[in-house]
Image (cartoon, grey):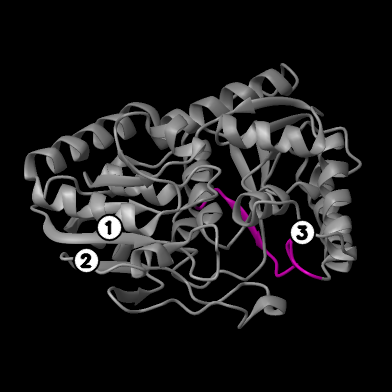
Amino acid sequence: MRALVTADTVGGVWTYTRELVSGLTRRGIDVTLVSFGNIPDSSQREWIDALSSVDYRATAFKLEWMQESEADLEMSSEFLLDVISETKPDILHFGQYCYGALKTDVPRVVVAHSDVCSWWAEVHGKQPEESSWIQSYRDIVLNGLKGATCLVAPSRWMLNAIRERYGALPSGAVIYNGRNPGLFNPHVSKDDLVIGVGRVWDKAKQVSLLADCSHKVPVWIAGSERHPDPAFEGRGNELLKRNVRWCGQQSEAQLRLLFSRASIYAATSRYEPFGLAPLEAALSRCAIIANDIPTFRELWGESVMYFRSNDAEDLARKIEQLQNDRELRLTYANLAYRRAKQRFTAERMVNDYVNLYQTLVPAGAAVA
């Protein structure tokens, strides 16, 4: 079987792509990978260089949610059609909605990693105001969904959010994201340290909750300050730096070290289709304090401690509670670790995708 996979290099989607593509190649699937957005730097593409069988095509075409992206989307669609004609894949796995509308007979899996409209509703409590940009975005998403063979979401909440806004269009499936547990160290002694991870410019991550109250334990925040769309650069991206240590953007290796050291991870997101950072913290045996939102309830059940939705003071109280109760902290750390190992591994995720592919492709395109 041959698969063409698209991705962007911004945030967690690139990490997801690493786990997916690495797992597919281990199962004997030939992969052509096309990325959009920023051209990845050498550290970002080390894993690709180690996979000699992957046919990688890096591009800098704008992403569908960016301002004034229409021309780029048209050019990137033409580029993809040329790649499809050249490589003749059996399955198309798109990380963007728009390519579901490509005129091709190859089965098209579209993955709902995120969505501007559902993001806006959770962050602002209302639908975005009408504008030429938002109308164009809605049309792009809707056309892509109409053309998709199957829609995949990383949580039931996200699948329902897409259907509520765009209709029950293609068949849908939930495939939870996964990480390789072997990349993380859950066996070292922990420091008295709370860590949060999130893009500072993304109000959905709201890592600023950690800076809104004082804490008796060190609190560190890691994440990008720079918005990937220049149209938004400099608009409200400042993080209140009081009460926390700002670490800036970290490499995967640096984040793994932080997770291994931290005793507590604060999952502050108010909008989260899945959330790879909490998973990585769980695989590092951190106790997790999570914002009480439906996605985290769906994914983590009673294996994490919840703070009242979007409430910085309650978050601070829960941090103090766990910090003062070592046994409770260890209990939550072990609960999160076991749940992550049971439900959210990369192997399970890739198996689910391969099983889905086999229901969509012709019988002759078997997996080796």
Residue drawn at x 40%, y 54% is: 311
Which residue has dot 1 on it?
A: 316
Mark 1: give few (<14), some (14-19) or many (20+) Cα within 10 Å. Answer: many
Residue drawn at x 56%, y 36% is: 154
Residue drawn at x 37%, y 59% is: 312
Please identify the residue farthest to the front as the structure is shown.
313
N-terminal-most mark, 2 or 1:
2
In the image, what residue type sits under mark 1? Answer: Ala
In the image, what residue type sits under mark 2? Answer: His
The x and y percentages for residue 213 are 31, 67
How far apart in space, not on screen, are marks 2 and 1 (Cα)? Answer: 7 Å
Viewer-side residue, 83 vs 164:
164
Q: Is residue 353 above or below residue 362?
A: below
Which residue has dot 2 on it?
A: 215
Q: Quadrant of residue 255?
A: bottom left
- Tag 2 and tag 1, C-beta contact below 8 Å: yes
N-terminal-most mark, 1 or 3:
3
| Magenta residue check for 53 | yes
Q: Which range is magenta? A: 52-67
In the image, what residue type sits under mark 3? Answer: Glu
How far apart in space, not on screen, are marks 2 and 3 (Cα)? Answer: 40 Å
Which residue has dot 3 on it?
A: 64
